[in-house]
Amino acid sequence: MDKNEETISLTKCDNSILADEIVSKLANAGIASSLHDELNDPAYGAYGPNPGIEVRVFKKDLERAQSILHEITEKREKQLPWCPNCGSQNVVALGKVRPKLSKWAVIIGVLLVVIGIVCIILPFCVKSIESATVSFLIISLISLAVGVVLVIPQRERKNYKCNECGTEFYKE
């Protein structure tokens, strides 16, 4: 970077990975940039709060750099989990969780499946209700569908915890 031109702070990053990604994208776009305070605090938090790693660009490149930064943050927000309570991306994965089914949902689901099967078989076994075969078939299909939906478990979700506010949340 030319020492005679004025540089302006584009952003401050919590970690060097994000800062390096921004500098790399800026370099690919032909925008010169530099990192400041990268090695400011080797013992993170030992001497007070870490101010973050600052990415600086020339004043003339600020608008282009801001649009590139906007693209990077939009892409990261779609990919990375963030806390729904405070909006922080400083979260840690706690593992995958398969939601538990309610005991009553399983009991009702199994009963509906049994009722559905009985409603399919019953008209063929009892001659006096042959005329009601269509209504039994409709009842059986509905009860089978609802029963299966209640019994089949939901898919796994990732469990996260926010390091800023302590909120635990799920993300599919």
Image (cartoon, rainbow, N blue to C red):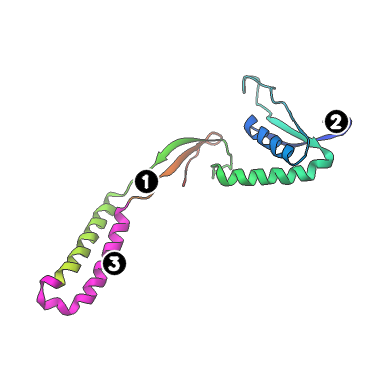
What's the residue at 70%, 34% (across, down)?
12
Between the C-alphas of marks 2 and 1, the distance is 57 Å
Is disc 1 placed on a helix, strand or loop? loop
**Residue furthest bottom in the image:** 131
Is disc 3 placed on a helix, strand or loop? helix
Left or right position of 27 against 16: right
Between the C-alphas of marks 3 and 1, the distance is 25 Å
Dominant secondary structure of the magenta stretch? Answer: helix
Q: Amino acid at mark 3?
A: Ile
What's the residue at 26%, 57% (across, down)?
109
Q: Residues within 10 Å of mark 3 (few under 14, many from 20)?
A: some
Q: Are marks 3 and 1 in contact (CB under 8 Å)?
A: no
Q: Residue 120 in magenta? A: no
Between the C-alphas of marks 3 and 2, the distance is 73 Å
Q: Amino acid at mark 1?
A: Pro
Disc on the earlier residue, 2 or 1: 2
Q: Would residue 15 be visible to someone looking at this image?
A: no
Percent coordinates x, y for residue 75 in the rendering: 61, 46
Q: Which mark is residue 117?
A: none
Is disc 2 placed on a helix, strand or loop? loop
Residue beneath disc 2: 2
Residue 59 figure quarter: top right
Residue 36, placed above or below residue 114:
above
Q: Which mark is residue 99?
A: 1
28 or 121, which lies in front? 28
**Range of magenta residues:** 124-152
Percent coordinates x, y for residue 7 in the rendering: 82, 34
Percent coordinates x, y for residue 159 in the rendering: 45, 40
Residue beneath disc 3: 142
Percent coordinates x, y for residue 74 in the rendering: 63, 47
